[in-house]
Amino acid sequence: MVVVCAGLLSGCFLAGPERIYITATPAPEPTLTPLPQGEGEVSPMLDWTATPWPYPFSDESATLSGICFEAALDAAGRTFVLHNAAELIEFYDLADNSRFCRHPVTRYPFDFSGGRVLAGLWSKGWGCTAHHDVLDIQRDDAARTLTIRLRFVTEGDCDYELVRPFWIGLDGVQDYEVEMAVE
């Protein structure tokens, strides 16, 4: 059995003739699908397959998947709220300037049109797998706040340091204070 720890901020996965699908919270067991056989060689692939969210936001973890594991580990526990493309570029620049990543981070765009906001965090822990559960969402239009309570869950006794992203796209909260609390 080969274990691959990729810099995709999702932790480690087993390498083999399966495709592993990372799904949205709440995280069911991964779906393993055999990859097509090539010329005697099979490459494991990690797919960011979008799962429809029953929440008032979109899963945007793939937008920050170019941030290396070390930079995400350093940023773990802090909430980031980005309101426009200039702030996203500055965020990527900070990751590049941190010198945690051996190569420049891969930059992915986010559609900020219509006042959309990109918000998120990384959580760290030890185990075999990790995911976030959404416990509560409180929107207070009078106070102009949006609070999302999450539970970070690690499972298994593996000796792997895990970093799990929780990045979302939000509509209608451009001038709100967005908070994320992780238990």
Image: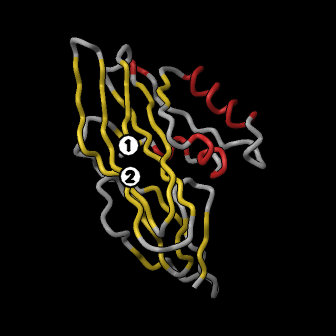
Q: Is residue 75 above or below residue 37?
A: above
Q: Could you say whether the residue bearing mark 1 is in a helix, strand or loop?
A: strand
Residue 127, numbered circle: none
- Position in image of residue 77 (x %, y %): 50, 41
Using residue 141 as the reference point, say whether residue 177 is left or right of it: right
The answer to the question of whether label 1 and label 2 lie on touching residues, with beta carbons closer than 8 A, is yes
For label 2, the crowd category at 10 Å Cα-Cα, with few meaning under 14, some 14 to 19 and many 20 or more, is some
- Position in image of residue 109 (x %, y %): 55, 34
Q: Amino acid at mark 1?
A: Val
Closer to us: 132 or 46: 132
Q: Amino acid at mark 2?
A: Phe
Q: Please report the residue visible at 55 percent of the width from the left and 53 percent of the height from the top.
A: 9
Mark earlier in primary sequence (1, 2): 2
Which quadrant would residue 160 be assigned to in this image? bottom right
Q: Please report the residue visible at 58 percent of the width from the left and 38 percent of the height from the top.
A: 108
Query: Which residue lies under the disc numbered 1?
Result: 182
Using residue 6 as the reference point, say whether residue 29 is left or right of it: left
- Position in image of residue 96 (x %, y %): 73, 37
- Residue 141 visible to the viewer: yes
